[in-house]
Amino acid sequence: MILTLAFRNLFHDRIRLAVTLIGILFSIVLVAVQLGLYLGASKMITSNIDHANADLWITVYGAKSFEDGGMLLTSRERHQALATPGVKAVIPLIVRFAEWRKPEGGSTRVVLVGTDAEDGGLEPFDLVEGSWEDIKAPEAIAVDRTYFNELGIKGVGDTAQIANGRVRIRAVTDGVRSFTQSPYAYTTLNRARALFGDGDGTTFYLVQTVPGADVKQVQQDLVNRLEGAEVLTKEEFRDRSLKQWLFRTGAGVALIGGALLGILVGTVIVAQTLYSSTKDHLGEFATLRALGSSSGYIYKVILAQAGISAIVGYILGISIALIILVLSHNTALPMVMTPALAFWLFTLTVGMCAISALSAIMKVTKIDPAVVFNK
Amino acid sequence: MIDQPQPVLEAIDIVKELGSGAGKVRAVKGASLALVPGELTLLMGPSGSGKTTLLSILGCILSSTSGSLRVAGTETSNLDSEELADLRRKHMGFIFQSYNLFPTLTALENVRIALDVRGQKGFAASNRCEEVLRDVGLAHRLRSYPGNLSGGEQQRVAVARAIASSPSIVLADEPTAALDGENGHAVMALLARIAKEQKRSVLAVTHDPRTLSYADRVVRIEDGRIVGEERRPDGLDAPEIADLTKRRKAHG
């Protein structure tokens, strides 16, 4: 009967129910979009780090992120690293911003990634046209199809100019977005060096350890050997890149702030509507009390109302969020929804509604059952 | 010799003060009353005489300022609100002047909720609710909402709700006040039947003289004090007890 009464109380006043559901829906959509964008941004920022086959990253001191590695390392650091116990391989990786001159005129910035896949470090991922072998061809480069317009190209075979040389599109990735809005362009290590005229300089060294090696110990040994360089685990480098782009730029704070605002607005709307619903049904709750119901029974009715609102509001909210997810798929900043985020949003909705029920419960706590005789 | 039944509710020297400071009012001034099974008692008095306040105290809804109230052998003066609710749940059924039905629940659900708060659920509870609704003549209205029922039917649902859990005490506040003559008589006949056939103590607060004919006992309250009590002599019918009451009052 608790659920029946809660359900009827809610659906008795459909306008108020609509306001409650819109409040929850608005809140869920806002939180889902904000956190979905946050996850999407995080995925973009760390995708190259996650796809790299490296236990440790050697960077120049103070490197801020994958895209902003700072000064170049030399082959000296590579030899020192290779001489460190527990190190199996040290793979160079070039990552630098570069000027992309469009075939029809105009220019934009790209992040040029120079990597040799046969080294086992980082190879272009999510290729939908062409292969790594194609990228090894003279002038070859791979870009993501999302950025064709921005790069002034139509697809495989088109040419452009990067820094000092001409490049030709030989492979295409799908879904490899850049948080900096400067598209990633993948080519071989030597071509990247040639385009920049950097000699044997490199932005990062990817360190692979021998099986069974203590990665932390290898990291410490490398730190002791390499002056002026930093040695970071994959997780540390991910965190540093995320911190740089999401928090130093304020983008992440804005996204999380938006999510918090959504939670706040949803809580206030649900609390307000639940409170007014409880106030309208106060006579009925007083009757229940007079009939001998415990306070707990009445609290359960109110919490059930909050719970039903949460479930219906969540289903509506997550449905709209999923539509936005699909629509955002081909944009520069796609939203991400994971089962964990969906579950977390459900927990958040239920929690938000339960907190919202507190004001109604406090109102009901003060019920004087004697009012049943004054009606 | 006939055994005197033990009271299921016993109030001794109940005093209730309402308000505070200069606005303090003594609504009940030392009322004593006992309810025994199988009896329909009317508590009658003019408006403002304290009858509803006394009913609230007897129903463990309001606490008295002083005096003793025992319900089913339990002294209530030191009980907190949850313990009082527990006592109401176990021993009492209530009927209200305005019926106080849940407008969003059907007649059957309105009765079921009274069992639900007592932890009685499932088919057995549902069957019991149907049984009492049939008993009060509402077998054809089980799934009707209060808004679609007449006043008399609503009050009969309220009676069914009050007796569904088989409480030993049924307390009614002006049960006929909102009803026309026919429905008022029907509800009083029902309460009298409940008292007699199911051996319950029924106390009805009323100022409706139509109800007198159904009473086993009439307790009069004026200005917060019990001023008289008449018991229907064996063999005396309703008009006679009403007349007796009038004559006693005229003679002081």
Image (tube, grey):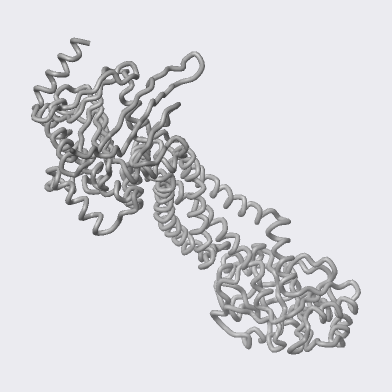
Q: Is residue A169 visible?
A: yes
> Which image quadrant for residue A117?
bottom right
Could you tell whether A68 is left or right of A17 in the image?
Answer: right
| Residue A92 visible in rendering | no
Residue at position x 55%, y 74% in the image? A174
Residue B103 location (% of width, % of height):
27, 40
Residue toward you, A131 or B87? B87
Query: Between residues B198 and A46, which one lies in front from this camera angle?
Result: B198
The residue lying furthest to the top in this view is: B251
Q: Quadrant of residue B3?
A: top left
Q: How far from the left and from the top, in percent, is residue A94?
A: 76, 76
Tell me: A86 left or right of B32.
right
Is residue A148 shown left or right of residue A48? left
Q: Count every numbered label the image shows and give the total.
A: 0
> Would you identify the image quadrant in which residue B92 lies?
top left
Residue beneath the point at 39% across and 45% down: B86
Outermost residue, front side: B1
Q: Nearer the viewer, residue A166 or B67?
A: B67
Answer above or below: position of B174 versus A354. above
Q: Out of A93 and A137, give the one closest to the viewer.
A: A93
Classify the position of the N terminus of chain B by image quarter.
top left
Which quadrant: the C terminus of chain B?
top left
Please name the residue shown 73% across and 76% down the image. A165
Give coordinates of residue A369: x percent, y percent.
38, 35
Residue B182 falls left or right of residue A365: left
Q: Position of residue A140 (x, y in %)?
A: 65, 81
